[in-house]
Image: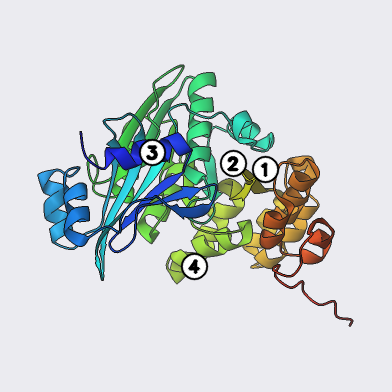
């Protein structure tokens, strides 16, 4: 059994989401969003390197010594599956372990908006799940794949970096391929998937122009494509895709988004009122003719007003979702306040304004 398993076992028992290991500090657990040290000595460089190298294959060890960061999944000898990132920094080696739940959470358990199930009924087009690192995008996508796997007879090809949740085929066939293990890049994975009779293609991250272009092609040619971007709103997501591709493809990209983009879900994780868990809160944009026209005419800055008025389509701005979650007593109001855009409408929920960000001043004219 690897020595690092003792830290992982402790973290799982405490209900942490992540374990962080770095030279010069004790191991750290992320508990409901906050980082807390384990009662242990500060880790020395040689000690931590020995812990980490116990987990690595020879090829991974060679890459690490050449200066390459590593991403892989690890199953602990004490039980539990983890996504691992290993890196080097000024003081030595470092690593982050993300705990992957044993049970696949359903969309209902995650508290996702009801419209998400309807979006999964589409047969072609693109659905994007966006948000900052650590906001639960992978878990949301896993719940969507599980829903499709349970309710439809499909060939689902999932391209991941690394594989986190392991899907067992139910009504559908689920094929999971890992970057670096089964495929050299997401773009090559999408290209190969299109030759494998897919109904659904999940792209772990649309991280470069080639991957975005291949994913768009797949969505336009009769496949349902699910993917992620590190963007923090629907508007920023659309702008990022347009800006990522060459200028001479700009009109083609806008046309794709106006016709083949199904929806953008942007999520954050907020503490619950008892501070013992976190809950996903989502902004939802569902493509309509009005939004498509805004994309084609370079007026994406007007998309938020469409979200605000689009309740009948299942749409909501992040501020609307935050207010609904506060009123339902699902999230901590002060944590929600820190994520709100228009903070004035949230001030009545905040008991201690001394540490809260200032609200935007009201100006006339």
Query: Residue at 47% of width from left, 42% of height from top?
Result: 16
Q: Is residue 83 left or right of residue 339?
A: left
Q: Dot 1, how many residues are within 10 Å of its Cα: few (below 14), some (14-19), or many (20+)?
A: few
Q: Which mark is residue 277?
A: 2
Q: Dot 4, how many residues are within 10 Å of its Cα: few (below 14), some (14-19), or many (20+)?
A: some
Q: Is residue 188 left or right of residue 347?
A: left
Of the two numbered discs 2 and 1 in the rendering, the one whose residue sits closer to the viewer: 1
In front of the other: 65 or 351? 351
Sequence-wise, the earlier of marks 3 and 1 is: 3
Which residue is label 3 attached to?
10
Q: Are marks 2 and 1 in contact (CB under 8 Å)?
A: yes
Query: Residue at 47% of width from left, 38% of height from top?
Result: 14
Of the two numbered discs 4 and 2 in the rendering, the one whose residue sits closer to the viewer: 2
Provide the secondary structure element on which disc 2 rests: loop
Which residue is label 1 attached to?
274
Which residue is label 4 attached to?
243
Q: Dot 2, how many residues are within 10 Å of its Cα: few (below 14), some (14-19), or many (20+)?
A: some
Q: Up-down: is 54 above or below 297?
A: above
Q: Looking at the picture, how far across and down is residue 195, in whole percent?
A: 31, 35
Q: Up-down: is 48 above or below 221?
A: below
Of the two numbered discs 4 and 1 in the rendering, the one whose residue sits closer to the viewer: 1
What is the distance, in whole Å, between disc 2 and disc 3 at their CAs? Answer: 17 Å
Of the two numbered discs 4 and 3 in the rendering, the one whose residue sits closer to the viewer: 3
**Quadrant of the rendered structure where residue 273 is?**
top right
Q: Looking at the picture, how far across and down is residue 80, in whole percent?
A: 36, 32
Question: Do we see residue 194 in this rendering?
Answer: no
């Amino acid at each position: 059994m690897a020595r690092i398993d003792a830290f992982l076992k402790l973290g799982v028992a405490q209900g942490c989401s992540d374990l962080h290991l770095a030279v010069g500090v004790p191991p750290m657990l992320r508990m409901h969003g906050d980082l807390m040290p384990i009662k242990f000595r500060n880790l020395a460089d040689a000690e931590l390197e020995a812990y980490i190298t116990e987990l690595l294959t020879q090829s991974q060890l060679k890459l690490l010594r050449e200066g390459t960061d590593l991403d892989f999944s690890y199953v602990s000898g004490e039980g539990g599956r983890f996504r691992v990132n290993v890196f080097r920094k000024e003081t030595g080696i470092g690593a982050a372990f993300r705990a992957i739940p044993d049970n696949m959470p359903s969309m209902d358990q995650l508290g996702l908006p009801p419209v998400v199930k309807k979006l999964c009924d589409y047969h072609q087009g693109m659905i994007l799940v966006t948000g900052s690192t650590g906001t639960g995008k992978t878990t949301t996508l896993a719940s969507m794949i599980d829903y499709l796997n349970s309710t439809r007879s499909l060939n689902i090809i999932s391209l991941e970096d690394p594989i986190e949740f392991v899907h067992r085929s139910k009504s559908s066939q689920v094929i999971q391929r890992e970057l670096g293990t089964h495929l050299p890049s997401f773009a090559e994975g999408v290209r190969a998937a299109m030759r494998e009779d897919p109904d659904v293609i999940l792209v772990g991250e649309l991280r470069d122009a080639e991957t975005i272009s291949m994913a768009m092609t797949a969505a336009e040619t009769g496949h349902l494509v699910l993917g992620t971007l590190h963007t923090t709103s629907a508007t920023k997501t659309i702008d990022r895709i347009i800006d990522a591709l060459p200028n001479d493809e700009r009109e083609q990209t806008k046309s794709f988004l106006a016709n083949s983009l199904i929806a953008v879900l942007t999520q954050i994780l907020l503490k619950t009122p008892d501070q013992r868990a976190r809950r996903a809160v989502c902004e939802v944009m569902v493509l309509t003719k009005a939004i498509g026209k805004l994309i084609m005419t370079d007026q994406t800055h007007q998309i938020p007003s469409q979200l605000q008025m689009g309740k009948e389509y299942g749409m909501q701005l992040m501020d609307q979702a935050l207010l609904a979650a506060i009123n339902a007593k699902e999230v901590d109001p002060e944590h929600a306040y820190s994520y709100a855009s228009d903070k004035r409408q949230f001030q009545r929920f905040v008991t201690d304004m001394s540490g809260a960000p200032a609200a935007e001043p009201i100006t006339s004219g």
